[in-house]
Image (spheres, rainbow, N blue to C red):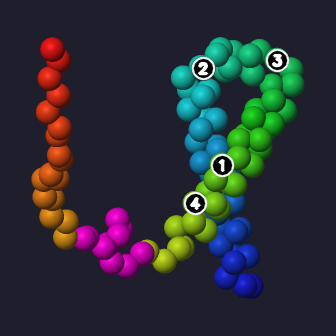
């Protein structure tokens, strides 16, 4: 199996694991009375699976994007450009004297 496909499958699996943890925390904390709604409904299991699956899609995409972007090469050298030696000198300004009479 190619390395990219293996990376994709593992990151998607991690995304769905993170989604399961997230939904578990949502139910444990009873956010927006979600636990009561799911346990009190006759189709609560379907609702729970839909919440897990939809969050799994989001977390899997984020997890894979993070894995791909973290594979980039780190920049070498200074990050803010090369330092330049700057010497500041006071500027001479000619002022003409004006008198108000």
Q: Which mark is residue 41?
A: 3
Q: Which mark is residue 66?
A: 4
Rounded to the nearest angstrom, the CA distance separating label 2 from label 4 is 27 Å
* Of the two numbered discs 1 and 2 in the rendering, the one whose residue sits closer to the viewer: 1
**Between 87 and 19, which is closer to the camera in this rendering?**
87
Mark toward the start of the polypeptide (2 vs 4): 2
Question: Taking the image as drawn, is residue 37 in sight?
Answer: yes
Point 18% across, 47% down: residue: 93
Q: Position of residue 96 (x, y in %)?
A: 17, 38
Name the residue that disc number 1 marks. 59
Q: Secondary structure at mark 3?
A: loop
Query: Image quadrant of residue 2?
Result: bottom right
**Which residues lie in the magenta part?**
75-84
Mark toward the start of the polypeptide (3 vs 2): 2
Point 17% across, 18% down: residue: 100
- Residues at marks 3 and 2 touching, judged by CB atoms closer than 8 Å: no
* Of the two numbered discs 3 and 4 in the rendering, the one whose residue sits closer to the viewer: 4
Query: In this picture, is 56 found above or below 9?
Result: above
Q: Which mark is residue 31?
A: 2
**Between 48 and 92, which is closer to the camera in this rendering?**
92
Q: Position of residue 58 (x, y in %)?
A: 71, 46
Q: Which mark is residue 18?
A: none
Query: In this picture, is 73 found above or below 18?
Result: below
Query: In this picture, is 35 found above or below 61?
Result: above
Mark toward the start of the polypeptide (4 vs 1): 1
Rounded to the nearest angstrom, the CA distance separating label 4 from label 1 is 10 Å
Is residue 28 magenta-colored?
Answer: no
Q: Position of residue 62 (x, y in %)?
A: 64, 53
């Amino acid at each position: 199996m190619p390395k990219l496909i293996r990376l994709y499958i593992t990151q998607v699996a991690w995304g769905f694991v993170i989604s399961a943890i997230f939904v578990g925390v949502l139910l444990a904390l009873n956010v927006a009375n979600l636990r009561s709604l799911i346990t009190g409904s006759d189709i609560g299991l379907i609702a729970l699976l839909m919440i897990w699956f939809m969050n799994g899609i989001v977390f899997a995409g984020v997890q894979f994007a993070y894995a791909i972007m973290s594979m980039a090469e780190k920049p070498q050298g200074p990050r803010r450009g090369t330092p330049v030696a700057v010497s500041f000198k006071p500027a001479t300004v000619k002022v003409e004297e004006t008198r108000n009479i």
